[in-house]
Amino acid sequence: MGRFPIHDARTAPTRGARAYLRSVRDRRGFVPHLYGALASSETALKVYGELSKFYSASSLTPTERQVVMMAVTRLNLASYCMAGHSAVAEALGVVPECIGALRTGRSLDDPRLEALRRFTESIYYCRGRADNSAWTAFEAAGYTPMQALEVLVGVALKVFSNFASRMTEIPLDEGYRHWVWSEGQPAPTQDAP
């Protein structure tokens, strides 16, 4: 075991963390390793969970939220999170070509999603200030200032979870193994195990 044990609803160090992990298990059917590692700090666990809830309630569609999160995850070289988001994107019905492009940093075929991906990357690289071309494309695609701030929430969420997954060096959950990722690796083929 490394510095960060992967807790479950019985082993988490505080009553609040144990209860939180029980709620995650009840909702998802299992406790992802990221939640288990974050349970070493009830504060970190709850911040991640609450920020995730707020982001899920944004006006961005589930696919748009995955575009933001996968774009940031690729930039942070966070293999655990990329595998998890690839699995989630597939479950949401995101087309395989889109998932593959997000995993490798290629342009997306959908112009609206590509404007969102470019805007997200610009915010990340420019530390909150998107460059003019990214802003122009984002607005031309029909996104609003409110949604720009929601993208920022997604960036913050992913920086937190990407850094946490790297700090804690958690192994991939069994359900994400099909989506193992390293920088520049595309989506697995349909016949992959």
Image (spheres, rainbow, N blue to C red):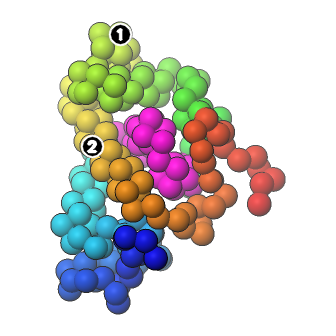
Q: Which residue is mark 2?
A: 156
Disc 2: CA contacts within 10 A as few (<14), some (14-19) or many (>=20)? some
- Whether the magenta-drawn stretch holds residue 67 is answered as yes
Residue 10 sits in quarter: bottom left
Q: Is residue 148 left or right of residue 184?
A: left
Q: Quadrant of residue 98?
A: top right
Q: How far, Cα to Cα, is label 1 from label 2?
A: 22 Å
Provide the residue span drawn in magenta. 60-89
Q: Is residue 27 visible?
A: no
The residue most toward the right is 191
Is 4 placed above or below 83 here? below
User: What quarter of the picture does the C terminus occupy?
Assistant: bottom right
Furthest residue in direction bottom, as rendered: 10
Depth check: 135 or 1 in front? 1
Which residue is nearer to you in this view: 141 or 192? Answer: 192
**Which residue is pictured at 25% across the width and 83% down the height?**
13
Q: Choose the circle earlier in sequence order: 1 or 2.
A: 1
Q: Secondary structure at mark 1?
A: helix
| Depth order, front residue of 168/119 | 168
The x and y percentages for residue 138 are 35, 19
Against 12, is 173 above or below? above
Question: Mark 1: which amino acid?
Answer: Ser
Give the residue at x 39% y 50%: 162
Residue 45: which quarter of the image? bottom left
- Checking the image for residue 133, the label placed there is 1
